[in-house]
Image (tube, rainbow, N blue to C red):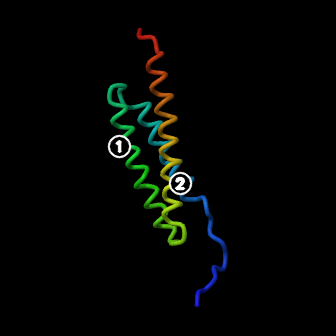
Amino acid sequence: MTIPELAPRRRFTAIVATSAFALLVAIAIAVLVPVELRSLWFGLAGGATVICAFVAHLVDGRAEGFIFRVSIAALGGITVLGIVALISMLTSVTAVPV
């Protein structure tokens, strides 16, 4: 016999946390890392985003739909990283050296 949940848990907290983590890391990379090393650091940030998504959903403690939720959170975080990386690379290419 299963016990029903008393109150529904928040569904999107871990997804938002993963995307926020990816955004903060991507902005830090775009601002602090030299242009020639950015692609390496964005790749490392992608791996860290996947680990962050996994940990965030482990803390949640729900087994139902775990793989789906982790994959959606990781995909969202990596999409955020990709958008910031694209903007960062385009601005570095179009910048006029002084």
Residue 68 at what x, y percent from top left? 52, 61
Q: Look at label 2 and name its amino acid.
A: Ile
Q: Quadrant of the N terminus?
A: bottom right
Residue 81 at what x, y percent from top left? 47, 40
Alpha-carbon span between mark 1 and mark 2: 19 Å
| Quadrant of res 92 | top left
Residue 74 at what x, y percent from top left? 48, 52
Within 10 Å of disc 1 (Cα), the crowding (few <14, some 14-19, many 20+) is few
Label 2 sits on a secondary structure element that is helix
What residue is disc 1 on? 44
Q: Look at label 1 and name its amino acid.
A: Leu
Q: Is residue 20 above or below residue 38?
A: below
Within 10 Å of disc 2 (Cα), the crowding (few <14, some 14-19, many 20+) is some
Q: Is residue 89 above or below residue 43?
A: above
What residue is disc 2 on? 72
Q: Is residue 57 left or right of residue 7?
A: left
Point 47% across, 67% down: residue: 59
The answer to whether mark 1 and mark 2 are in CB contact below 8 A is no
Point 48% across, 30% down: residue: 86
Q: Which mark is residue 56?
A: none
